[in-house]
Structures are given as C-alpha cells and as structure tokens.
Image (cartoon, helix red, strand yellow):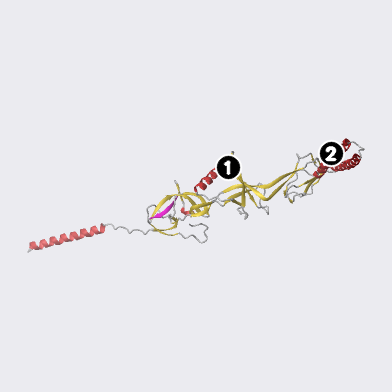
C-alpha cells in the first residue's frame, strides 16, 4: 500500500515538472511580428506623345536696312531741318549744303545751252541753202550736245546740295553740325535705319546643327517647311508677333564653331532696337513619341538621373536620360518605354524590391506640370 502511494506521488511530480517545463518554453518562444502593409505611392503611366522641341538662343537685333547719309558735293552745311532720332519718310530733306556756287554754275550752263541751241538752229537753216559748210553745222551740233551735258551735270550738282533720305526709317544723330564744311562723300552726315521689320541674328552651335540633321534623318525630329521664331525680351516679355527665318549662312564661323541664322520680325511699335539682345526660340520643331514625366519623379544619384517604377507590385530603379524641361516635366530621352509606371509621390518610402500599393497620380489643379 505504501509503495503504491509513493509511485503515484512520483508520477504526479513528474507530470507537474513536464507541465512547468512546457509553460516556461511557451513563455520563452518569440512571436513573429505582423508584416506592415505596403506603402502607398502615386504613379503615372508613360504614354508617348508629340511635343514641341525647345531650342533657345541668344539673339541680337539689327536694322533690316541701314543707309549712311553722305553728300556728293562739297560745301558748308547751312541747314539741318530734321530732328535727330525721329522717323522720316523717303525723300525727306536732311541737310542743305550751301548752293551758291552750284546754282550759279547751273544758270551759266543753261545760258550756254540756249546760245548753242540758237547757233545750231541758225546754221541748220543756212546749211539748207548751202550758205555754210557741213562741218560748221556738225561743230554747232557738238557744241549743243556739250552744253546739254553741262546743264545736266550742273543741275545734278545743284540738286545734290539737298541731301535727302534714301529710305523710310529712323534717322540718327547728326555727325556734322551747322556751319561745318563737307569735303565730299568721305564725310558721314548721319545714318537712317529701318527697324520695321527688324532682323534678329542668332547662332546655333555645330553640335545642335548635327543633332538636327541626325534626328531629322532618323525620324526623331520633325522639321517644318518654314521655320518661325519667337522673341523673349530681357524682362521675360514674349512678343506676340512671330518672326520668319530668312537667311542661313553658308559656312560655320571658325572662331566660335557656330552657324549664323537670321529671322525677320514685324516691329511696328519699335519695341526692338538695333543692337538689343533677346532670346530667340525656334518654333515648329516637333519631337514624336516623346516621354514626359513630372519633375519630382526624376531623382539624382551618383551615376546620374533615375526614377522609381512599379513592376509586379514591387519597386524597381530605372536609370534615365533627362534632356530638357518641358512645362514642368522632364523630357526623357532614354530609360523608359510606353506602359512603365513611374512613381511620382512616395519616393521617400520607396526602396528597390519593396512591395508598394500603386494609385494613379493626380496633379494639383493649379499645377502647370504636364502629365502624359
């Protein structure tokens, strides 16, 4: 009986030890933490489109016509009826050279011409009755012709004392004042410049020209039949009137490696002045199948620009080539293709390989960024 009691006691003690050991082991076993939900990111799906190519250069305005006003005769400047810096019409009197000697020479030539004409008429009537020799009549004809030539020359000299504008334009500062003596065509009196329309000179680099040719040949750039330009002033004002390209230089400038181009632009209000620097934008160039992504989607790393994309529910990194800025978006030349989903918002929590929850990107209503 006593032995049975002891056996039962040992059995109970062993069972209790097992229970305590199991409980202790259960308390020590770590519990696996629950996986966090995937981060939510906004993505934009890449859709290629045709966009305007952005090429902008520094340009300088130049008068479409510029005429140096010079006198063909010598003499003292006795009048300057124009106001400096004003617009004048073609034929407007600008300077008057002392006409005294030229007027006297003209009158003298006219008198000689009248005398030669009377002498010729008399000899012709006598020649008909054979009262004079043919040689006398021929000499009278020669004298008449010489007198006529002298009248024409002296009249031109007299007319040249009235120095007039040869074009319609804006007349500049007078180089010779009243009372100054003009020694001939070597003396510059003033300059008249036509600024409506006005020229704009700008010079693309040889690299840009080669890229245009290469991209046009491969279909990556669409060139217009007639290229237009848009002008931006120094304060950012964009002129409403567009200009037309009207000259392309035949050769590159060896000093700068650029090719000179020229556009003509309406300038009725004389906003542009010769010598003024502006920014010239080329219009009409198109990039087909262009890929645009919002600006903040493009990140910068040690190896260059990259974006995060969502592929199979996970984040992946794509190295890209961002070439130019277009209305708040980057133009991507390489690294993306149609259908790629690019992360725009949430890049701070994105890491390669992590699962994410992608939602469609919704740009702010007041945002100027373009979304494909």
Q: Residue at x 21, y 59 (%)?
A: 22
Coordinates of residue 78 in the picture (x, y in percent): 82, 45
Asked if the magenta segment contains residue 308, the reply would be yes
Coordinates of residue 7 in the picture (x, y in percent): 10, 61
Q: Residue at x 13, y 61 (%)?
A: 11
Q: Would residue 175 be found to the left or right of residue 105 on screen?
A: left
50 or 8: which is nearer to us? Answer: 50
- Which image quarter: residue 35? bottom left
Query: Hey, which residue is sitting farthest bottom in the picture?
Result: 1
State which region is magenta. Answer: 306-311
Provide the secondary structure element on which disc 2 rests: helix
Query: Hey, which residue is sitting farthest left in the picture?
Result: 1
Task: Give whichever of discs 2 and 1 has the lower sequence position.
Answer: 2
Against 343, residue 139 (above or below) is above
Provide the secondary structure element on which disc 1 rests: strand
Say if residue 106 shows up in the picture: yes
Against 54, residue 8 (above or below) is below
Badge 2: residue crowd in 10 Å (few <14, some 14–19, many ≥20):
some
- Which image quarter: residue 19? bottom left
Real-space Cα separation, disc 2 to disc 1, in angstroms: 57 Å
362 or 5: which is nearer to us? Answer: 362
Against 63, residue 40 (above or below) is below
257 or 118: which is nearer to us? Answer: 118
Residue 258: give its label: 1
Q: Secondary structure of the magenta portion, mostly? A: strand
Coordinates of residue 353 in the picture (x, y in percent): 37, 53
Query: Hey, which residue is sitting farthest front in the picture?
Result: 129
Q: Which residue is mark 2?
A: 146
Say if residue 234 shows up in the picture: no
């Amino acid at each position: 009986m006593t032995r049975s009691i002891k056996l039962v006691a040992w059995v109970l003690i062993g069972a209790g030890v097992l229970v305590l050991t199991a409980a202790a082991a259960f308390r020590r076993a770590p519990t696996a933490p629950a996986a966090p939900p995937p981060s939510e990111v906004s993505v934009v799906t890449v859709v290629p489109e045709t966009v305007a190519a952005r090429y902008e250069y520094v340009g300088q305005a130049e008068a479409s016509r510029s005429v140096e006003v010079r006198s063909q005769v010598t003499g003292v400047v006795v009048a300057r009826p124009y106001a400096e810096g004003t617009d004048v019409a073609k034929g407007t009197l600008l300077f008057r050279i002392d006409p005294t000697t030229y007027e006297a020479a003209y009158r003298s030539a006219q008198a000689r011409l009248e005398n030669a004409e009377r002498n010729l008429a008399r000899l012709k009537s006598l020649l008909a009755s054979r009262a004079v020799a043919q040689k006398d009549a021929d000499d009278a004809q020669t004298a008449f012709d010489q007198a006529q030539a002298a009248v024409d020359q002296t009249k031109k000299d007299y007319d040249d004392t009235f120095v007039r504008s040869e074009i319609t334009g804006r007349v500049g500062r007078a180089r010779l004042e009243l009372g100054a003596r003009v020694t001939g065509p070597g003396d510059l009196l003033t300059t008249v410049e036509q600024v409506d329309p006005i020229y704009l000179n700008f010079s693309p680099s040889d690299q840009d020209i080669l890229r245009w040719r290469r991209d046009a040949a491969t279909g990556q750039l669409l060139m217009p039949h007639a290229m237009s330009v848009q002008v931006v002033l120094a304060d950012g004002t964009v002129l409403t009137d567009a200009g037309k390209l009207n000259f392309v230089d035949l050769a590159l400038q060896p000093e700068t490696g650029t090719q000179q181009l020229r556009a003509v632009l309406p300038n009725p209000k004389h906003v542009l002045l010769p010598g003024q620097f502006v920014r010239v934008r080329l219009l009409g160039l198109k990039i087909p199948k262009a890929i645009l992504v919002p600006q903040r989607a493009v990140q910068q790393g040690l190896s260059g620009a990259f974006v995060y994309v969502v592929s199979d529910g996970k984040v992946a990194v794509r190295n890209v080539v961002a070439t130019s800025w277009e209305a708040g978006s980057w133009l991507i030349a390489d690294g993306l293709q149609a259908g790629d989903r690019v992360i725009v918002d949430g890049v701070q929590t994105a890491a390669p390989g992590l699962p994410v929850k992608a939602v469609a990107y919704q740009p702010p209503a007041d945002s100027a960024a373009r979304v494909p």
